[in-house]
Image (cartoon, rainbow, N blue to C red):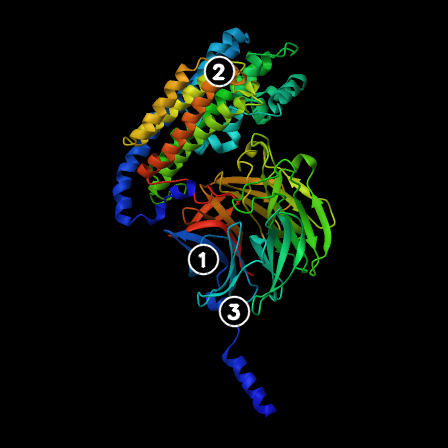
């Protein structure tokens, strides 16, 4: 199916490329201005508030609201895997999930038992990506292990590190990458050699974002009917599994709306999935193990599969892009 | 009469000289691509410029180049029912090779050093047992086959001394639709064969890595570097690269921790610089290339959508992508060389 959808950008006649890209440029610029930059700015601001709060208290209950707002802000940009977030493993460090081998908890136990110097700002930035970020903080603020020693220094170090990364990503966008994306195809832009490449990149973020929610956020807790795995849900300890699905869908829909005004089937498919997710009364997908409740999660899963299909057809056509020639084709 | 016969033979040799790669414009690389709905094979110069292009009847997977004559063998995508021997000067298909009944080409091949023998990776269609098909190259007829030493062989490379290394990927595939049938039991290996096809040495991966299919190879001064594709849980970290010097155990090379998932468990193509100082692996799925030192230390990761083909260049590497761009690639980054109309397919093959 994917191969049929591969659109060959390079073959657009020169004239149509020019005609299309005038519109497209405005659309890429709109995504940058209306979604990406405000999204990262909010993520930087909320994580800074969390870091500020963590300097005055380590009480989990006190810090949880700021943690939740930081995670909310992250969900508006989590699907973006291009530019500054890709540097130094920031994306992984900000939200290391899934973690099937429990690398994060293991690394945190070592940090708690080890030399406190590892928690100093520069040293901590070099620690395992699995130990850091939102998932690291979640384990500390919603602990299921009562035997942990004093976690206060680690809470503080993790919150500061998270804010530092968020600020760096924000600065990377405002200080250059936004311009790189907006000036796709201009002389000297060696990241995006043509304007359609910028659209292609944003399209890829949307499809990958949908697949992340489909395969991981829903797929991991669902497991199989014979072997459901509700304990594998994302951000279960902080009660955010379903919320993350809802926020991600909303963020992806908003991104599509900024990218092109003319994809009615895609928007309708988003709205259907978003309505279903809103009606799902199962915050951490515990229902994956209950046949009746499981069905509702599976219905959402089916809606996302169909949404992906619609986006791959209609949105790809509208943007004149597709899934990569090779990327779709492993060998 | 003898004199006359000798004279005629000499005349024939003089008027029908063997062609060389220079006659095809001295390309440095072969690259298959897609142009609209058609498929093409290009010879590319080191600068990325096209030196020739030839229509292909269907999408290919990889090609291999005759060491001296301007002949390319283009393999069909798996399950491969044909390979084409292409004259890169005239642009004509000289021979169409079909595997014997019950065999399928599996993507790659290699010539002997003198070019007299073509060795093709093949599977027995039912069960994917590996074979190396043998073809003489005067008329490209089948002259025999060897055991590949494992299941599902993919890439095959000839060492400078004539021995052959086979990447037995370990995967049993459905003969018709490529469905993978044994992911829970797969055991990939690297097999070293003598120039006569005898199994000389073999290494397997540790039990924890048996779902890492060994698929592509690059020659290094000590042996081969190999690229792997993880068939296990994609949430687990899987190493993309290994090094093997025959006679020793293999060395597994991890990505840098911050780039542990940068290739998404999929190393598609691999190349090493001739001095062995650097190795590059690409992932079209992830849109990234990862560079390692010759000892397997990660050096850099660069991103580019649908980047797949990679081959050594005078300074570092040359890479190709599915948007049609040819890139220079080194530790510091990717620099565009030429943008073509053709969208480049999986592999970029160095000639010579």
SS at mark 3 in the image: loop
Q: Residue at x 64, y 21 (%)?
A: A106
Q: What chain does badge 2 belong to?
A: A
Residue B254 location, x and y as percent? 62, 37
Residue positioned 35% across, 48% down in the render: A10
Left or right of A253, for residue B123: right
Q: Earlier in the sequence, mark 1 or mark 3?
A: 3
Question: Which residue is the site of mark 3?
Answer: B20
How many marks are shown on the rendered structure? Answer: 3
Residue named by callout 2 = A293
Estimate the spatial distance between the alpha carbons at disc 1 and disc 3, rounded to whole Å.
Answer: 18 Å
User: Can residue B339 be seen in the rendering of this structure?
Assistant: no
How crowded pointer 3 is (Cα within 10 Å; few <14, some 14-19, many 20+) is rated as: some
Which of pointers 1 and 3 indicates the residue nearer the eye? 1
* Label pair 3/2, CB-CB below 8 angstroms: no
Say which residue label 1 marks. B41
């Amino acid at each position: 199916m994917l191969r049929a959808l591969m659109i060959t950008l390079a073959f657009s006649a020169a004239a149509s490329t020019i005609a299309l890209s005038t519109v497209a440029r405005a659309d890429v610029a709109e995504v940058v201005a209306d979604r990406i930059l405000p999204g990262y700015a909010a993520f930087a601001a909320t994580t800074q508030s969390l870091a500020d709060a963590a300097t005055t208290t380590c009480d989990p209950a006190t810090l949880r609201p700021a943690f939740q707002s930081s995670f909310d802000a992250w969900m508006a940009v989590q699907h973006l895997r291009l530019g500054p977030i890709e540097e130094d493993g920031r994306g992984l460090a900000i939200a290391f999930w899934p973690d099937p081998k429990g690398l994060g908890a293991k690394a945190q136990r070592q940090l708690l038992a080890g030399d406190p110097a590892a928690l100093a700002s520069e040293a901590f930035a070099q620690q395992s990506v699995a130990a850091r970020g939102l998932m690291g903080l979640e384990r500390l603020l919603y602990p299921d292990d009562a035997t942990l020693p004093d976690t206060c220094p680690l809470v503080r170090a993790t919150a500061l590190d998270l804010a530092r990364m968020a600020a760096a990503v924000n600065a990377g966008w405002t200080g250059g990458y936004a311009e790189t994306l907006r000036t796709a195809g201009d002389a000297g832009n060696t990241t995006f050699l043509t304007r359609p490449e910028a659209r292609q990149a944003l399209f890829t973020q949307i499809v990958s974002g949908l697949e992340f929610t489909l395969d991981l956020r829903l797929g991991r807790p669902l497991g199989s009917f014979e072997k459901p795995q509700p304990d594998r849900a994302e951000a279960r300890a902080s009660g955010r599994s379903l919320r993350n699905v809802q926020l991600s869908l909303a963020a992806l829909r908003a991104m599509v709306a900024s990218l092109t005004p003319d994809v009615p089937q895609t928007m309708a498919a988003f709205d259907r999935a978003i309505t279903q997710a809103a009606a799902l009364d199962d915050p951490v997908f515990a229902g994956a193990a209950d046949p009746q409740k499981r069905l509702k999660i599976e219905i959402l899963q089916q809606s996302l599969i169909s949404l992906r299909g619609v986006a791959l057809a209609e949105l790809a056509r509208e943007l004149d892009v597709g899934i990569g020639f090779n990327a779709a084709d492993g060998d | 009469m003898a004199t006359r016969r000798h004279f005629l033979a000499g005349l024939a040799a003089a008027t029908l000289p063997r062609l060389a790669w220079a006659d095809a414009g001295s390309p440095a690389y072969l690259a298959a691509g897609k142009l609209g709905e058609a498929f093409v094979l290009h010879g590319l110069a080191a600068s990325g410029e096209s030196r020739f292009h030839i229509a292909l009847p269907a999408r290919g997977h990889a090609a291999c180049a005759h060491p001296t004559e301007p002949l390319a063998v283009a393999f069909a995508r798996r399950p491969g029912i044909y390979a084409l021997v292409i004259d890169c000067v005239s642009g004509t298909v000289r021979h169409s090779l079909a595997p014997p009944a019950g065999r399928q080409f599996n993507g790659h091949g290699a010539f002997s050093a003198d070019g007299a023998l073509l060795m093709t990776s093949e599977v027995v269609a039912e069960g994917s047992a590996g074979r190396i098909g043998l073809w003489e190259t005067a008329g490209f007829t089948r002259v025999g086959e060897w055991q590949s030493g494992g299941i599902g062989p993919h890439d095959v490379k000839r060492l400078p001394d004539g021995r052959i290394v086979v990447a037995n990927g370990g995967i049993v595939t459905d003969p018709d639709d490529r469905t993978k049938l044994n992911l829970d039991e797969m055991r990939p290996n690297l097999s070293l064969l003598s120039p006569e096809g005898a199994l000389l040495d073999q290494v397997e991966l540790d039990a924890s890595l048996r779902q890492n299919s060994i698929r592509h190879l690059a020659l290094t001064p000590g042996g081969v570097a190999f690229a792997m594709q993880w068939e296990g849980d994609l949430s687990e970290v899987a190493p993309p690269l290994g090094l093997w010097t025959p006679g020793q155990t293999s060395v597994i090379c991890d990505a840098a921790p911050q780039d542990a998932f940068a290739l998404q468990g999929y190393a598609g193509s691999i190349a090493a610089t001739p001095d062995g100082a650097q190795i590059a692996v690409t992932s079209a799925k992830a849109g990234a290339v990862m560079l390692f030192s010759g000892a397997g230390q990660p050096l850099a990761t660069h991103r580019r959508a649908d980047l797949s083909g990679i081959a050594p260049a005078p300074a570092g590497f040359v890479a190709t992508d599915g948007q049609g761009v040819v890139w220079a690639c080194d530790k510091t980054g990717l620099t565009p060389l030429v943008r073509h109309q053709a969208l480049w397919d999986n592999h970029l093959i160095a000639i010579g």
